[in-house]
Amino acid sequence: MSELALKTASFNPKVKSYWITLGVITCLVCLVGIPLIPIVALIIWIVAGRMLKAMSANLLERKLVVKRGVFFKEEKSIPLEKITDVGLSQGPLMRLFGLSFETAGQSGHGALVSLLGVVNASEFREAILTQKDNLTSDQPAQSNNDEPQSQVELIRSLTYSVKNIEQMLVTLLEEKK
């Protein structure tokens, strides 16, 4: 039975330019690669277009489904209850292209999935977290044996809030420089 997608991510076409710029910078760093810049840029341009077409991220009722890959296809289906954090980050080159890097993961286990160039990434992030919260609130209250579990969720929520505050402070400090 097919689930109805609650939210579908679209990817910014600027990712292609970002990848080309990274390829050119890599070639410039390697003196041997300088004559290869036009060839590398052309190859990246062709492959990046196909990679963008193959990328998808769909938020379903109970999971996040991410597909990508041209030569090696990859599909990840992540249950929302396993996602404890959805982070957004931007490097200087990403800011230049107006892109962000989104990761959905578990605490202590790193990212379960990474997405580069999601359009309205913060909106998609909020949709994931809101749907996760909806699932959590829809689950019936259980016996007092689960009280330690609710404390763990509270600690995770507080940790998440502190991380967001730290990220906002870092961003503010970078903007002041």
Image (cartoon, rainbow, N blue to C red):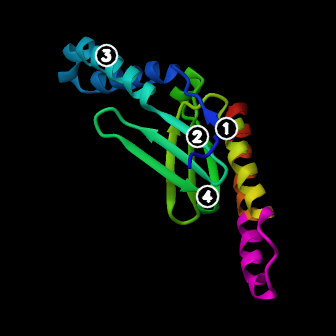
Badge 4 element:
loop
**Residue 166, position in %: x, y?**
71, 51
The disc placed on residue 41 is 3
Camera-near label (1 vs 3) is: 1
Q: Is label 1 in contact with label 3 (beta carbons under 8 Å)?
A: no
Q: Amino acid at mark 2?
A: Asn
Q: Give the Cα separation between the discs numbered 1 and 4.
A: 16 Å
Q: Is label 1 in contact with label 2 (beta carbons under 8 Å)?
A: yes
Q: Earlier in the sequence, mark 1 or mark 4?
A: 1
Q: Amino acid at mark 1?
A: Lys
Magenta segment: 138-156
Q: Is residue 157 above or below residue 118?
A: below
Q: Give the Cα separation between the discs numbered 3 and 2.
A: 30 Å
Q: Give the Cα separation between the discs numbered 4 and 3.
A: 36 Å
Magenta span: predominant SS is: helix
- Which residue: 79% across, 80% down? 142
Q: Earlier in the sequence, mark 4 or mark 3?
A: 3
Q: Earlier in the sequence, mark 1 or mark 3?
A: 1
Residue 43 lies in quadrant:
top left
Badge 1 element:
strand
Q: Is residue 162 visible?
A: no
Residue labelled with disc 4: 83
Q: Earlier in the sequence, mark 3 or mark 2?
A: 3
Towards the viewer: 1 or 84: 1
Residue farthest bottom in this picture: 145
Towards the viewer: 51 or 33: 51
